[in-house]
Amino acid sequence: MKIESKLAQIGSLSEPKTGAVSFPVYQATAFRHPQLGQSTGFDYSRTKNPTRSVLEEAAAELECGDAGFACSSGMAALQTIFALFGQGDHLLVSLDLYGGTYRLLEQIMSRFGVTATYVDTNDLAALEEGRTEATKAVLIETPTNPLMMITDIAAVAAWAKSHGLLTIVDNTLLTPFFQRPIEHGADIVIHSATKYLGGHNDVLAGLIVTKGAELSTKMAILHNSIGAVLGPQDSWLLMRGMKTLALRMERHEYNATRVAEFLEQHMLVEQVYYPALAGHPGHDIQQRQSSGNTGIFSFRMTEAALVEPILRHIKLIAFAESLGGVESLMTYPAVQTHADIPEEIRMRVGVDDRLLRLSVGIEHVEDLIADLSNAFQLAYAETRTKAPAGASE
Ligand SMILES: *Cc1c(COP(=O)(O)O)cnc(C)c1O
């Protein structure tokens, strides 16, 4: 079956008793045992819940892995994965990283003796240089957020395997509809399902998919032991969102490409970071390892003074901190999502005070372009009428 069909049919054949096409929400924490030593397969919902199981099986199948684990958020999923590591272990991690992941590693995992080095994961020489005897895994975001740096997953996974390291890929931005890292050799895929998989800015969730029996067993123990699992209502809501993932991703990609092309031509925009554009440094790898492009990208204005009035004048696009939903959202990474990353690192990767991030929704693309065009015009006019500092004296 093609992925569009798998998505649309999530859970639809899983309820034989009544034939319910939408899999029911099993709002139960305990399950009766038929008799001593027997189980229906469900005992207690932290370990296994029927609604969550349908979602987890779908996640594993979509990502071409062996087991899926639904967590209460993307961060909960990352914490569960990081619990594979312990005192003295070291990780190699994408330099341009989701701010929350950086905070979890630096403020929490460091206290458990797990250290990380941040490198350009598409540079095998940099990975080799960062590797130590204690290195256990590589964590890749591709594309990265917000600068959309691309990593060749197959190349890194092969390198990691040759050194006995795990390859972990945060696939939040592309989803299995466009990219399946396990097919390129990754061992673990993690999602903030809060973003594209849920797709409607209404459910917080995380997913883990593992490849291989041993790793899947280890992860099941961690998932149950840590207990940051997704509840049945949210599991149902996430599946409901995922059924339309294919349609949404196609529209996100179409809209984002048109908007990126518009911004690329605009005189107030210095640079657009979107891998679908031919000039992007990761364009070729992205086209090879993925079947499409995400709906989010960043762009740098010519002046920092334009940012505040632009955020004030956008009307259809909301100034808000998330991505991947049907509604378009604009973020100012330096003060929002990436505020916890030290300025020195932010500047090194390019998350500066002129950078804006746009999560392009599924609205009509002409309305989005008109909204941006209008906000840019008003912002420009405001910055010109304000006298330059010191000019009035
Ligand atoms: C949002 C996000 C996370 C964290 O997920 P939550 O669901 O917010 O906990 C992790 N990685 C990436 C790439 C994200 O965008």
Image (spheres, helix red, strand yellow):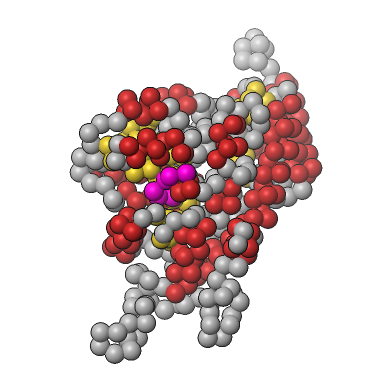
Can residue 307 be seen from the camera position used here?
no
Is 186 magenta? The answer is yes
Is 142 magenta? The answer is no
Report the residue at 53% width, 86% height from top.
17
Which image quadrant is residue 53 in?
A: bottom left
Residue 76 located left or right of residue 337: left
Image quarter in which the C terminus is found: top right
Report the residue at 65% width, 23% height from top.
270
Looking at the picture, tell me which residue is in the foreground, 335 or 295. 295
Report the residue at 51% width, 26% height from top.
350
Q: Residue furthest left?
A: 87
Q: Tell me where the magenta segment starts and ends, as one range.
A: 184-189
Which image quadrant is residue 90 in?
A: top left
150 is higher (above) or lower (below) than 217: above
Which image quadrant is residue 312 in?
A: top right
Can residue 29 be seen from the camera position used here?
yes
104 is higher (above) or lower (below) than 35: above
Report the residue at 41% width, 59% height from top.
66
Query: Horizontal and vertical percent for residue 246?
Result: 64, 55
Query: Horizontal and vertical percent for residue 3?
Result: 60, 58
